[in-house]
Image (spheres, grey):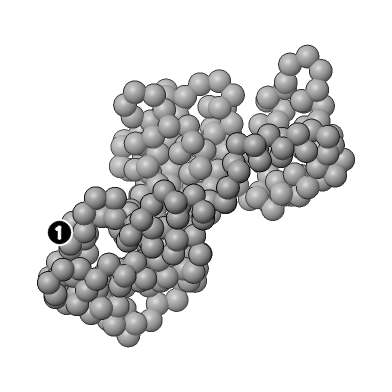
Amino acid sequence: MGNAQPTIVPYEDFDVTADIKAIRKACKGLGTDEEAIIQILANRCAAQRVEIKQAYFEKYDDDILSYKQAYAQVHERELDADIEDDTSGDVRNLLMSLLQASRDEGYEVDEDLAQQDATSLFEAGEGRFGTDESTFTYILTHRNYMQLQATFKAYESLSGTDILDTIDSEATGTLKECYITLVRCAKNPQLYFARRLNAAMKGAGTDEDTLIRIIVGRSEIDLETVKDMYLEKYDVTLKDALDSECGGDFKRLLIEILH
């Protein structure tokens, strides 16, 4: 976690006025200069992109307003409300807990807490008849990833079982899939994202939404490390994988973000 490297850092010569003028020029007239837009957005950090968006809205609000109105027509409800309506039981509780964003985002590890949580997980699963899903949900959605790694080690020492094996035997269906995803992400987030990227490019068609979400979302966090994990896991660079599976401006944008 501590040595994770990004591919995008703040652009040193950032000029928001110049950027929005360049984007505006690229969008107007006959056709769109996608290359110009890609070069700007793929080389600005998230904070700079937010500043670009706000400045563009202030200067060219006629375009943005129409985009917002179109979006509102498609998404008439909040995500929380949709999840409450479309899920139920323990899966709903887990997803709502994640939406509350209550996870500790630090890196500190409390070994005593790790032992306590390991015991709680054991007593909620292997150590009882039936499973207390609320305990699993609370710990997996509230502890920081380093803390969870310590908890998983303590759990294996306590029970002699890997936490993933316990989840596999104690949970079922969608809830099990959610728990496994959370555990894998906590154990090695960069390997988890490498696996997700590979899965998004396999089979019939390409899951472009997943590629965008991961590559853009991790670009300022650990994308450089995700690239290393991808190469180690699949013996091909992420850039080469994208080059063979994607095309057009979409591919150029993602590869530009990879640097």
The number of callouts visible is 1
In this view of the protein, which residue sits in the foreground, 188 or 210? Answer: 210
Q: Residue at x 33, y 29 (%)?
A: 202
Q: Callout 1, which amino acid?
A: Ser
- The answer to whether any part of residue 40 appears in the image is no
Residue ID for mark 1 = 169
Q: Is 46 or 208 nearer to us in this picture? A: 208
Q: Residue at x 42, y 23 (%)?
A: 244
Percent of width and height locating residue 32 = 72, 21
245 in relation to 209, above or below: above
The C terminus lies in which quarter of the figure?
Answer: top right
Quadrant placement of the N terminus:
bottom left
In the image, is 138 to the left or to the right of 152?
A: right
Residue at horizontal 29 percent and vertical 82 percent from the top: 116
As displayed, is residue 14 above or below residue 24? below
Mark 1 crowdedness (10 Å alpha carbons): few <14, some 14-19, many ≥20? few
Can residue 34 be seen in this snapshot? yes
Residue 186 shown left or right of residue 153 in the figure: right
User: Is residue 94 shown left or right of residue 208?
Assistant: left
Secondary structure found at label 1:
helix
> What residue lies at 73% left-to-right and 16% top-to-bottom?
31
Q: Position of residue 144 (x, y in %)?
A: 43, 69
Q: Where in the figure is residue 197, as x and y percent of width and height?
A: 40, 39
